[in-house]
Image (tube, rainbow, N blue to C red):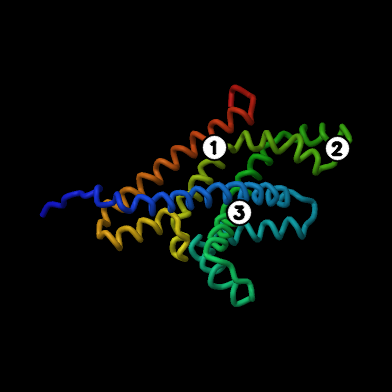
Amino acid sequence: MSYQLDFAGLVPYLPQFAAGLWATIELTVISTLGGLLLGTLCAQGRISKDAWLRRSCSCYIEIIRNTPFIVQLFFIFFGLPALGLKLSAWQAGMLAMIINLGAYSAEIIRAGIDAAPKGQWEAGQTLGLTRRQVFWHIILLPAYQRVYPALVSQCIIVMLGSAVVSQISVEELTFSANFVQSRSFLSFESYMVAALVYLLLAILMRQTFALIKRFAFKNPSL
């Protein structure tokens, strides 16, 4: 039994794919920025002298890193309304992605901070800076340099994981592929296009992060 590929049959649905692609890009950009900011703050909390803050950040990180993303997504979208907090599918998907990336990036960034020589902390405090000022002005940038490849990989994983939010009807790329195949019955072609677009997005993300690295970190050896 032979199967004749019919990618031409997808041409009428290109606007649907384009809308899904744009939604995926929006989710990725916002969740990457929000997740990295949250991860940086939690990494700082993990090394804080405040025991309550340190334990709170540790608890959040352990819960998120040891539960499936789809369960976190369903809890936010289906569970929180029981507590009186109702979010749209888009808001729930975005929040889930930010929270997920925040937990993973926090541990990655903390590893970079832990690798900082103690002399840097002592030098900053000798200059009269507070611990927080030392962290933000002396420790953080070198920490990002050390763990940058791991952060990039985690951001790409979150982008690929955005496909899961289609389960709550967020109209991103996977949702679009599902819609198209249900109308055209071209399942192989629809999901092949989606897979290739995700691959292209991952490559473009790596190239974009490489450019950011070139401008953010002046050390040519990095």
Asked if marks 2 and 1 touch (Cβ < 8 Å), the reply is no
Between 146 and 33, the one nearer to me in the picture? 33
SS at circle 2: loop
Specify the amino acid type for callout 3: Ala
- The image position of residue 214, as x and y in percent, is 58, 28
Viewport quadrant of the C terminus:
top right
Residue beneath the point at 27% across and 59% down: 184
Q: Which residue is mark 1?
A: 149
Q: Farthest residue in the top direction?
A: 220
5 shown above or below 150: below
Q: Which mark is residue 103?
A: 3
Viewport quadrant of the N terminus:
bottom left
Specify the amino acid type for callout 2: Leu
- Res 85 quadrant in image: bottom right
Asked if marks 3 and 1 touch (Cβ < 8 Å), the reply is no
Asked if marks 2 and 3 touch (Cβ < 8 Å), the reply is no
Q: Earlier in the sequence, mark 2 or mark 1?
A: 2
Q: Farthest residue in the right direction?
A: 128
Between 12 and 41, the one nearer to me in the picture? 12
Q: Which mark is residue 36?
A: none
- The image position of residue 126, as x and y in percent, is 87, 33
**Gap in Å between the C-alphas at discs 2 and 3?**
28 Å
Residue beneath the point at 44% across and 38% down: 203
Q: Farthest residue in the left direction?
A: 1
Q: How many marks?
A: 3
- Note whether residue 73 is visible: yes
Specify the amino acid type for callout 1: Pro
